[in-house]
Amino acid sequence: MYRTVDAWPLIPAAGPPSGHCHARRTRLPAGADAARMARILDQAARLWWGGPARLWTERVPAAAGSAEAGRRLDAELFRPVHPEGTGLRAVLLEYADGPADLVLVAHRARFDATSLRMVAEVLTERVPRERFHAGHTPAPAPDAELVKRWQEADYSGATVEWAAGDAAAGDRTGVVSVPVRESAHLAARIAVAAALVLGRYEGRRCPVIGALAGLPSRPEGALGAYDAGTLLAVDLSGAATTGELVAGSARILDGEGGWCDSRQYARLCAETGGRVLAGLLATPSGEDPPRRTAGESVVPGRTSDEDVVPCQTAPFPLTLVPGRDPDGSPRLDVRHRLEDVDEESARRFARHVARVHELLADDDLAPADVDLLDEPERRHVIRLGRPDRPLERRPERIDEIFAARVAERPQAVALTGEDRTLTYAELDERAGRCAASLHGMGVRPGDRVGLCLERTPDLVITMLAVLKAGAVYVPMDPAYPADRLAYTAGDAALRVIVTHRDFPPGKHLTVVSPEQLAAGGDSSLDGGGAPERGGPDDAAYVIYTSGSTGRPKGVVVPHRNVVALLAATEDDFGLGPGDTWSNFHSSAFDFSVWEIWGALLTGGRLVLVPYWVSRSPEEFHELLVRARVTVLSQTPSAFAQLMEADRLRDERLAVRLAVFGGEPLDARPLLGWLDRYPDCRLVNMYGITETTVHVTAQTLARGDAIAGSRSVGHPLPGWHVYVLDERGRPVPTGAPGEIHVGGAGVAAEYLGRPELTAERFVPDPFAGGRMYRSGDRGRLRPDGRLEHLGRLDTQVKIRGFRIELDEIRSVLLDDPSVTSAAVVLRDGRPGDPPGAPRGAAADHALARLDAYVTPADADPAALRRRAAKVLPEHMMPATITALPALPLTPNGKLDVRALPEPASTPTPPPAPAEDFTRTLAAVWESVLDAPVGPDDNFFELGGNSLLAIRLGAAMRERGLPALPLRELYLHPTVRGLARVLGHE
């Protein structure tokens, strides 16, 4: 009886009674004989449904058309009626100056609009009641249990992401009206237009539109027919033209199958508990009187004596009602539940539906050919993504600005780390000495120099030295596997690498330590005919990011981009010599660019955070207190650990500015921090390596934290953003699309990847120059703020690191024993289903990677050992599960939700151990939610830094010795840790 919609899990839910009630007013200018009308109603009711009916009569002590009369009329028109009994209420309002209004209110499960008009015509004696067939009774009332389920249906579960609903609005309904062009199959065209608009707003290929209407095939003269329901699944994939979609929808609306009666429709709704976002109230032929909404007075000068309320409360969040104005021209009313959709969003939706309806006059269009925006709105949306403040600073080199800071305050402290402190003058002198040494080794302007150093003063000295020599630094994390380091050195054509570690040998590669570099030259590079360093357009650094081909790719960033970033934020953030910055992140992560140069180019002090301190929130907190750090940069995952450490301590931090980046932020847990540090400014920033660290900024207030805001704010001065569809067209505000970034931060290229550079760095058709296709999904709000909605591809972020899942997959496939592989991200503890939705509530700190390989006899342990030689720790899968075959969808794609629970690492039988070892293993199991043997590796079982914190807390609760996190990283097994703690 109804159309099955496999691609959409939600169908309309029956709302409160008013959501299925409609009303009709008939004006009687000369008044009415109330007693006679009551007798007619009673006689007609006995004929129609074999029982009595009552006419309620009320005298209104005010003139018709007065404010008081309007309030009384509204009270009756919008008073719901229950579907039980007759499902009809008749009220006669008699006004003091003579006129009267007959108000009929009915439930759609008992009377459709035509039936209500028939009742009005009989009671006003425009037609005799005998005209209507006896025996055509209203629809039977639903059973009591079903009615109860209708009334208890929960509307709170669904969210309209592109609109701002008011949770306190209750059942209140707003209405917006737009003119539409006359057309055949008006209702079907509006339904298809609405589906196309919703498809764009929500990024869906097969949106569903509900419909309620009187039975298409009712017998003539039948009274008491009910509204029937149907669902229209509109396929926007391009398999059908818009004309074919309209024709198919028209056939269903005309009654060629697909309808179900109100009881079946309500049962379907009650059983699923879901709903469709938009629905159509089809209007019976010729039934187009003026319509009203609550609070709207009768328009003066109307000649019609009829008024219709098609729905007291919109039965759908967006309820579309085609109709006509008093002059006969077609129009569309969009009635919107204020709980779900605000007026501005409803107006935008109605305007787009009207535009698409007009475009549907061309029946040969493909759905993707339809552009929702006209030229004025397109220009408006493009302007939204541009900041109000221009970037006002001439391009310069990083080392030139640093030299200016040295000249201003040579004796001010520039950086501290490893119990060493350097002033700006000392840092400048040592960097100059190392630059001379690099020049003596043959490094020339434009050459690339590798830096594989921990966060120590040597790292910053060498960075600055490379720039002073006119060269380009290429940072590499010393914790990366040797194969990855060797690949980076070869891909970047490095001739010199500065490091303390044994670096993989390479052709024409010179490896030198910072000490050797400092001893090999003097600070006279700037004189004696030294080569020119170049200009601000020259590259400053190359940072390698994860690549979908299985190999990292180098992003080339010029000096001017970094200078522009500081110019765009310096005044707003109040950055200056009084600040102390922490350098928490690896130099191979571009967040460190902001930390290091943000401090040194604004005259601040940089505090270098040793690796092991960055792994321990307690030690990091102590460092922040001791160093009086004022500017803190953190990934949300790391900050969550710091907040917990701060909560347990009395010492208060001096942080005045905390900047978040690197991964999506759930703002809700920040309330505690805002309570403890009300003067600390929290800023959520969205950025990409290819657009120079940061693009947008959103200062977070308590309201943002309470609401769990996903806004990343407005673009920085000099940057601009667009949200575009697959054809490069701007999408409406609130609609999702791909984020494109233009302006001052766009990087130069992918090193040695001209094809990839041309694919991702594309011409900016709106502002000139180039823009970067981010591959991120986002939406622009009407106020110009950007919301980040995740990735469009397989790229994810874990604890601030951007990871291409395909890179990990490629490494697994390199093993000759593997025939196919898949890698998925999980957002919770072991046991969470792969591919589970990730949103504001996702626990990103617990996110982990699970890998699946075929065939079933592949050795996960051997695969792990091989992958560990290539992949850094943050890219290593927590589990590797061997399967006979990977599950596929009917389209031949990986069925992520059908992947089984990951296999735990095989655990040998526990060896005899002391009570302490057994107790320690039990604590591990409680934290990891997995079986633990004495030689199992904490991190291979899914452990990470946050779970390590929780392990330390659990050990304290059990009265066990304190857990130094460094020892857990060095001895990640129960047996090894027990030995270190002195119990084995």
Image (cartoon, rainbow, N blue to C red):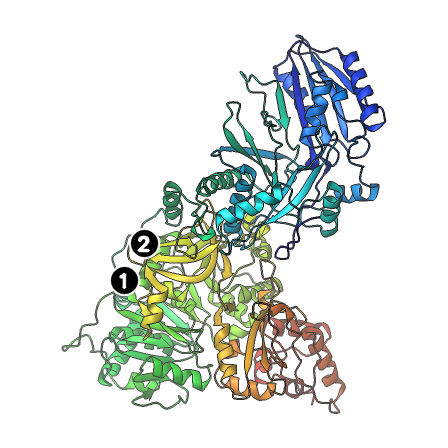
Q: Nearer the viewer, residue 433 or 931?
A: 931
- Visible residue check, residue 537: yes
Q: In this view, does 362 lie to the left or right of 325?
A: left
Q: In this view, does 30 lie to the left or right of 89?
A: left
Relative height, residue 839 to residue 337 (above, below): below
Furthest residue in direction right, as rendered: 51
State the image coordinates of residue 99 (x, y, percent, origin top left): 66, 11
Q: Which of 186 and 837 is in front in this view?
A: 186
- Visible residue check, residue 612: no
Q: Is residue 588 left or right of residue 510?
A: right
For residue 765, which numbered disc appears in the image?
Answer: 2
Which residue appears at 55% of the width and 83% of the height? 819
Which residue appears at 48% of the width and 79% of the height? 810
Q: In which quarter of the image is residue 697?
A: bottom left
Q: Name the residue under label 1.
A: 408
Amino acid type for the residue under numbered disc 2? Pro
Which residue appears at 21% of the width and 72% of the height? 533
State the image coordinates of residue 770 (x, y, percent, origin top left): 31, 59
Front of the two marks 2 and 1: 2
Q: In which quarter of the image is residue 858?
A: bottom right
